[in-house]
Image (cartoon, rainbow, N blue to C red):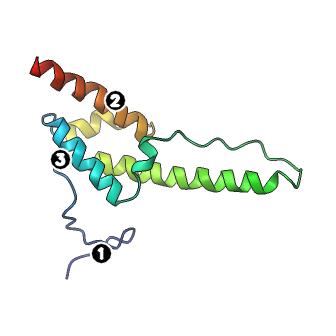
């Protein structure tokens, strides 16, 4: 019997998990990892910025808005953590070491796209 992923309930041998990106075939890996992140329901953080929570107020009218924004921030933070680590798990060890810095998933994704989309376009010319 296969081990079960506590977060998603899927088996550890996830058939949707893309191959490890070694620095070549970025467009293929990009499509596969985007599908994987969509299946895991965390791809949204690649298109959104971190929600901003206003200063806490003693005004009772503003309290529900602040609580809602805090929930949005908590949800975004959790999804960003998951997304970032799903991306890292799809990278080779060398690329993992290079891109493993304290940034959001969106910033890491943009750095990968900037390097490898540009690089592949240059090769085709």
Q: Which residue is mark 1?
A: 4
* x and y, in percent, of residue 68 in the image: 69, 55
Q: Which residue is mark 3?
A: 20
Determine whether 79 is above or below 55 in the image: below
Residue at point 55% right, 55% down?
Answer: 75
Mark found first going from the N terminus, 1 or 2: 1
Q: Quadrant of the N terminus?
A: bottom left
- Residue lying furthest left: 124
Determine whether 39 is above or below 6 in the image: above
- Residue lying furthest right: 59
Q: Quadrant of the C terminus?
A: top left
Q: Secondary structure at mark 2?
A: helix
> Could you give the CA–CA distance between mark 1 and mark 2, rounded to whole angstroms?
32 Å
**Number of marks in the image?**
3
Residue at point 35% right, 50% down?
Answer: 85
Q: Which residue is mark 2?
A: 111
Mark found first going from the N terminus, 1 or 3: 1
* x and y, in percent, of residue 6 in the image: 37, 72
> Could you give the CA–CA distance between mark 3 and mark 2, rounded to whole angstroms?
17 Å
- Residue lying furthest front: 125
């Amino acid at each position: 019997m296969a081990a079960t992923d506590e977060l998603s309930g899927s088996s550890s041998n996830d058939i949707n998990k893309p191959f490890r990106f070694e620095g070549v075939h970025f467009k293929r890996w990009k499509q596969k990892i985007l599908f994987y992140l969509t299946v895991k329901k965390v791809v949204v953080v690649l298109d959104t910025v971190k929600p901003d929570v206003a200063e806490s107020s003693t005004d009772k009218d503003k309290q529900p808005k602040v609580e809602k924004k805090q929930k949005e921030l908590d949800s975004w933070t959790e999804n960003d953590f998951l997304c970032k680590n799903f991306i890292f798990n799809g990278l080779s060890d060398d690329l993992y070491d290079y891109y493993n810095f304290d940034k959001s998933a969106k910033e890491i994704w943009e750095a990968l796209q900037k390097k490898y989309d540009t690089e592949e376009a240059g090769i085709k010319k």
